[in-house]
Image (spheres, grey):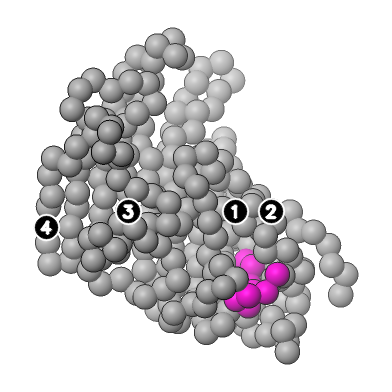
């Protein structure tokens, strides 16, 4: 089989800029269980339409990650049609690899019948970074304070707000969502906050109210940034499991 470098698409640049990034399945680690999660990132994207007017909308990227014994299967983001801000159906590629391996195998879709294209995992992680163990509370020296905690049977939501007027680029509200019962998988948005709260951080939301920006010299619309993980019910689809079974022979 000829090993060619696949085209990896839809880089999540905002996550790269905002958070220190790590990867799923670090080489010294092993998945804890057979389970699947969806990692969702939402951030504002400004585009210029034909008449020169700027339009800001929320772009949502998602990556599914399946942990299956010694193997990890990643469903990468679909291609986005920026003219309509919609995902192109069935355009999600997959990468399958064994934990601890330098290489994995890339498939164009879940219906790809090939044996996959050999792919360097470090290169994959640079192009498709995933925020991990990086989210934190605002620094104690900052103007943000915890002002509300909502508790429920499933977990808690913590709300932080600034005590004074905010400056350009800073959120006016931050929410942290924690769950008591989440699958024990080798992934965390923040191991530090998981440990402090004795439960899993499953979502961070930052809200930016509409306001005039002195830096950009224009009115900025309401914006929202979200980092979230969701438990995928039902396990790995059969078509994806078939990809994994074909990859096993590469590691035999």
Question: Within 10 Å of the Cα at label 4, are there few (<14), some (14-19), or many (20+) other Cα atoms?
Answer: few
Q: Position of residue 178 (x, y in %)?
A: 25, 59
Residue 8 shows which numbered tag?
2
Give the mark, 3 or 2, whose residue is nearer the N terminus.
2
Residue that mark 1 sits on:
128
Helix, strand or loop at label 4? It is: strand
Residue drawn where x is 30% and y is 39% of the image? 139
Q: Position of residue 23 (x, y in %)?
A: 54, 60
Q: Position of residue 204 (x, y in %)?
A: 32, 49
Residue drawn where x is 45% and y is 71% of the image? 186
Question: Within 10 Å of the Cα at label 1, are there few (<14), some (14-19), or many (20+) other Cα atoms?
Answer: many
Residue that mark 4 sits on:
151
Residue 48 seen in render: yes
| Residue at the outermost bottom position | 252
The answer for how far apart the CA atoms under marks 1 and 3 are is 19 Å
Q: Is 251 drawn above or below residue 28 in the view shown?
A: below
Q: Is 210 drawn above or below residue 112 in the view shown?
A: above
What stretch of residues is rendered in magenta? 94-102
């Amino acid at each position: 089989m000829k090993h060619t470098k696949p085209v990896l698409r839809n880089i999540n640049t905002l996550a790269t800029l905002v958070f220190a990034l790590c990867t799923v399945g670090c080489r010294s680690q092993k998945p804890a269980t057979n389970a699947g999660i969806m990692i969702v990132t939402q951030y504002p994207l400004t585009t210029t339409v034909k008449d020169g007017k700027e339009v800001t909308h929320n772009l949502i990227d998602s990556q599914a990650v399946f942990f299956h014994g010694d193997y990890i299967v990643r469903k990468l983001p679909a291609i986005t049609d920026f003219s309509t801000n919609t995902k192109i159906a069935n355009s999600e590629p997959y990468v399958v690899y064994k934990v601890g391996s330098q290489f994995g195998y890339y498939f164009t879709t879940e219906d790809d019948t090939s044996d996959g294209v050999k792919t360097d995992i470090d290169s994959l992680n640079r192009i498709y970074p995933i925020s991990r163990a990086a989210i934190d509370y605002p620094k104690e020296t900052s103007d943000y304070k915890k002002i509300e905690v909502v508790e429920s049977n499933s977990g808690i939501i913590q709300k932080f707000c600034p005590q004074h007027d905010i400056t350009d680029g800073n959120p006016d509200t931050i929410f942290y969502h924690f769950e008591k019962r989440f699958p024990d998988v080798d992934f965390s948005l923040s191991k530090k906050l998981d440990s402090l709260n004795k439960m899993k951080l499953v979502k961070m939301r930052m809200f930016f109210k509409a306001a005039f920006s002195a830096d950009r010299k224009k009115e900025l619309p309401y914006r929202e940034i979200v980092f979230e993980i969701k438990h995928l019910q039902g396990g790995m689809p059969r078509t994806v499991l078939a990809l994994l079974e074909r990859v096993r022979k590469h590691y035999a």
